[in-house]
Amino acid sequence: MANEIFDRDTILDLTVNIIPLGIIAFFVVGFAVFPAFGFDPLTTAVQYGLLIVPFVFLAILTYLSGKAIAGDEQRSAVYLQGQATVEDTKTLEEYEEAAERAAAESDDETPELTESEKA
């Protein structure tokens, strides 16, 4: 499998965390530009605390989840979607190798056209 922590499949798995991070960041910027409740030190601190603290914890959770997902893909067998519990199924790596061999064999065995097919 890939050596990168955040490859395409891992990012796809983490989208459920990345989208809320974007929403929280939007509201932090929005409240900084347009203060909805005016500026009172206590109110502003509570308002930003309720946005920034979950943002930080969700960012940490997302990073750790990405490492766990990528690490699990490197340690154990990865199956096609829905095939993990099916008996006698190929792993994703075996499936990709078989597809590469089939593609290589089809390139080697290009059928030659007969005289009647050329015309």
Image (cartoon, rainbow, N blue to C red):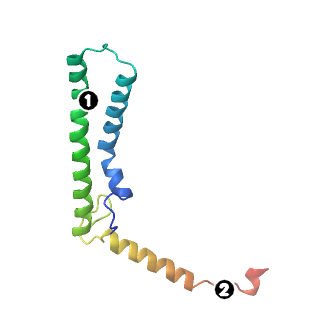
Give residue 51's mark. 1
Q: Pick whichever of labels 1 and 2 is earlier in the sequence.
A: 1
Three-letter amino acid code at the position of disc 2: Glu
Q: Where does residue 95 sit, x and y in percent of width and height?
A: 37, 72
Label 1: few (<14), some or many (≥20) within 10 Å?
A: some
Q: Is residue 57 left or right of residue 113?
A: left
Front: mark 1 or 2? 1
Q: Position of residue 77 (x, y in %)?
A: 25, 69
In the rendered structure, find residue 18 and report the number of the disc placed on it: none
The one nearer the camera, 84 or 14, is 14
| Residue picked out by circle 2 | 112
Q: Residue at x 35, y 18 (%)?
A: 35
Coordinates of residue 39 in the picture (x, y in percent): 29, 15
Q: Is residue 55 above or below residue 65?
A: above
Residue 97 vs 24, above or below: the answer is: below
> Residue 20 occupies which quadrant of the picture?
top left
Q: CA distance from mark 1 to mark 2?
A: 67 Å
* Residue that appears at 22% across and 35% down: 54
Q: Around disc 2, counting alpha carbons within 10 Å, would you say few (fewer than 14), some (14 to 19), or many (20 or more)?
A: few
Query: Based on the displayed image, in which of its 4 quarters is residue 24 positioned?
Result: top left
Which element carries disc 1, helix, strand or loop? helix
Type of the residue with mark 1: Leu
Q: In front here: 96 or 9? A: 9
Q: Residue furthest front?
A: 41
**Between 32 and 18, the one nearer to me in the picture:** 32
Q: Quadrant for the N terminus, please.
A: bottom left
Residue located 34% across and 72% down the image:
93
